[in-house]
Amino acid sequence: METQDVYLVGGPLDKSLMDAVEEPLLEVAADGLIHRYIITNTRHSAEGRELPVYQFDGTVSPDGGLPGAENPQNRLASPLADEMRGSGTAATS
């Protein structure tokens, strides 16, 4: 799959450009956590190009959840979290 620059809005990577495959959900591993970004219908002008904008949607821990914040057993699946835990499942981003 071909990658292109995308523009991230919000969260720890606010106003960053990132080379990624354009998909509905982008998961970025940083500082031992997974930061999730969701594609929007908005475009951002940068370096003479119109880039897809991804909005920050939250942070999850690769072990399944943050203690006290959620029940790790009931969390939504995260392909990147599965890969970081070593299950062998391919990441989507």
Image (cartoon, grey):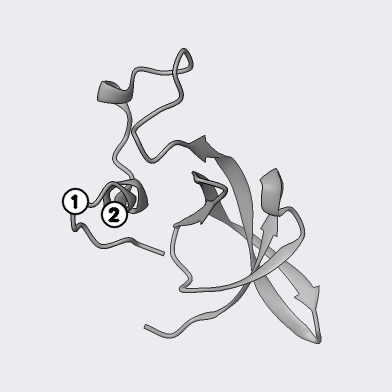
The residue wearing badge 2 is: 83
For residue 39, side relative to residue 74 (left or right): right
The residue wearing badge 1 is: 87
Assess whether mark 1 and mark 2 are in contact (beta carbons under 8 angstroms). Answer: yes
Spatial CA span between label 2 and label 1 = 6 Å
The percent position of residue 1, horizontal first and vertical second, equals 36, 83
- Please tell me whether mark 2 sits on a helix, a strand or a loop: helix
In the displayed structure, would residue 17 be above or below residue 83? below
For residue 54, side relative to residue 81 (left or right): right
Near-viewer residue (68 or 50): 68
Decide: few, some or many residues near mark 2? Use Cα within 10 Å; few <14, some 14-19, many ≥20.
Answer: some
The percent position of residue 64, horizontal first and vertical second, equals 34, 32
Near-viewer residue (84 or 1): 84
Q: Residue at x 51, y 56 (%)?
A: 28
The residue lying furthest to the top in this view is 68
Q: Quadrant of residue 45?
A: bottom right
In the displayed structure, would residue 14 be above or below residue 2? above
Decide: few, some or many residues near mark 1? Use Cα within 10 Å; few <14, some 14-19, many ≥20.
Answer: few
In the displayed structure, would residue 23 be above or below residue 66? below
Which amino acid, by three-letter code, is at mark 2? Glu
Which amino acid, by three-letter code, is at mark 1? Ser
For residue 59, side relative to residue 13 (left or right): left
The residue lying furthest to the left in this view is 88
Q: Residue at x 44, y 36 (%)?
A: 61
Image quadrant where one finds the C terminus: bottom left
The percent position of residue 69, horizontal first and vertical second, equals 48, 17
